[in-house]
Image (cartoon, helix red, strand yellow):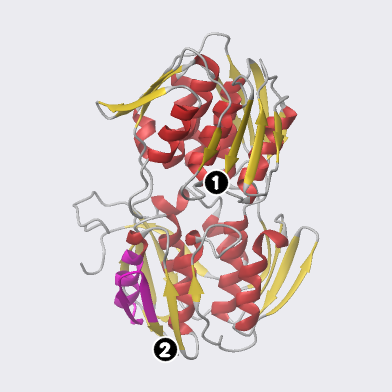
Amino acid sequence: MRTAQGIIAPVTEHFQVRGGARLVGEVEVVGAKNSVLKLMAAALLAEGTTTLTNCPEILDVPLMGDVLRSLGCTVDIDGDLVRITTPAQLNHRADSASMGKLRASVCVLGPLVGRLRHAVVALPGGDAIGSRPLDMHQNGLRQLGASSEIEHGCVVAKAEALRGAQIWLDFPSVGATENILMAAVLAEGTTVIDNAAREPEIVDLCLMLQEMGAKVEGAGTSTLTVHGVTELAPTEHRVVGDRIVGATWAFAAAMTGGDITVKGVNPHHLDLVLEKLRTAGAEITTFDDGFRVVQDGRATSVDFMTLPYPGFATDLQPFAIALSAVADGTSMITENLFEARFRFVEEMIRLGADARTDGHHAVVRGVPRLSSAPVWASDIRAGVGLVLAGLCADGVTEVWDVFHIDRGYPKFVENMQRLGADVRRVLGEPTRA
């Protein structure tokens, strides 16, 4: 079978999606994929047992567990509970096979440098959404006093000592902010990270580090101030709700003319997203730990532009395109972060979308209904976007390479079915290439 990357792959599971259902009901969102993996890495900073609750049951969690085990940790995963016991003597080499399977594996770099002053970390894998260089990660560590080079496919970082520094990020990179932050908490003196990422997942990491005894100020702002301490202690921490998964269900309601109540996520983390959906015609009610989206009839076209938080998240761009494909009118979607995300548009065209791309822009003219076809997911969000599009198509759409979806969405098919969608996980060859 053909994959989205154009290579030959063995027959795998795929989803069959029958269009026409109006999604109605309630769905519970658990901990964020974009947070839990970084919190697992932060457990390396303290000897003893760290416990994480509200963890999503997704493929990436055991993969990160394998990475931590290769460093000498004991990792126990029981449903939404993850216990990580970090030994006094850690291995500084993170170059196991699991490193190449997820992008977040690079976040062990900061904790290893912070605690051991030495790290050899294999270059990470993950979604095929475009270039994500490690320059800012390395430059931040260098300003803290470490050397950092790429050697034989690994980031190699060493330091005699780490000392606080004034660090300016050219771009508010989430990964660079996390790695520099986790190295700085055990550095001597004070570190200031300017133009830091502001995502709720960064705030979640700061909260956990504070619970471990770190002195971090400015969480949620563009300036993080870290006063280094000599050691940290393990803690128990509840992972923040997954705003990206929450937004997924919001788009599902808007696309299918549905009525979905989402619980387990802070609605203020999605202020801009929900406002966009209101503009598209949805009626939205928010409450302390969630929101309700009701769409009466066909959505109206809206323009989207991806930007770092609190802007419109690049992870939600496939959903914006999918919504635009069935909305009334023409939308322009501008991608400012990852150039390869527009690969998704090629698969949407297979479903009958009227869309074209030009550089960082996609112009999508909505059609009343899409047409079913076999399509291939290139990453987590693209895969889910294709499922949402299939809900708005005639006939049965086959979505392939669904292992991507399993990496980011716990109990995805079960939640879809609970809301009334006809989505099944099956084995078999594509009906056509």
| The magenta stretch spans residue 255 | no
Q: Residue at x 27, y 30 (%)?
A: 153
Q: Residue at x 61, y 21 (%)?
A: 186
Local secondary structure at mark 2 = loop
Q: Residue at x 50, y 90 (%)?
A: 328
Q: Which of the 4 image quarters holds residue 115? A: top right
**Disc 2 packing (10 Å; few <14; some 14–19; many ≥20):** some
**Any mark on residue 367, and which?**
2
> In this rendering, would 426 be left or right of 222?
left
Is residue 413 visible in the rendered image? The answer is yes
Q: Are marks 1 and 2 in contact (CB under 8 Å)?
A: no
- Boundaries of the magenta span: 342-363
As drawn, 35 above or below 262 = above
As drawn, 415 above or below 168 = below
Task: Name the spot of residue 260 as percent of width and height, x first.
Answer: 67, 71
Identity of the residue furthest to the front in this view: 166
Task: Name the spot of residue 281 as percent of width and height, x first.
Answer: 63, 85
Given residues 61 and 313, the one toward you in this image is 313
Q: Which residue is mark 1?
A: 34
- The three-letter code of the residue at mark 1 reads Asn
| Circle nearer the N terminus (1, 2) | 1
> In this rendering, would 26 be left or right of 136?
right
**Disc 1 packing (10 Å; few <14; some 14–19; many ≥20):** many
| The magenta stretch spans residue 350 | yes
> In this rendering, would 195 be left or right of 395?
right
- The alpha-carbon separation of the residues under discs 1 and 2 comes to 33 Å
- The three-letter code of the residue at mark 2 reads Val
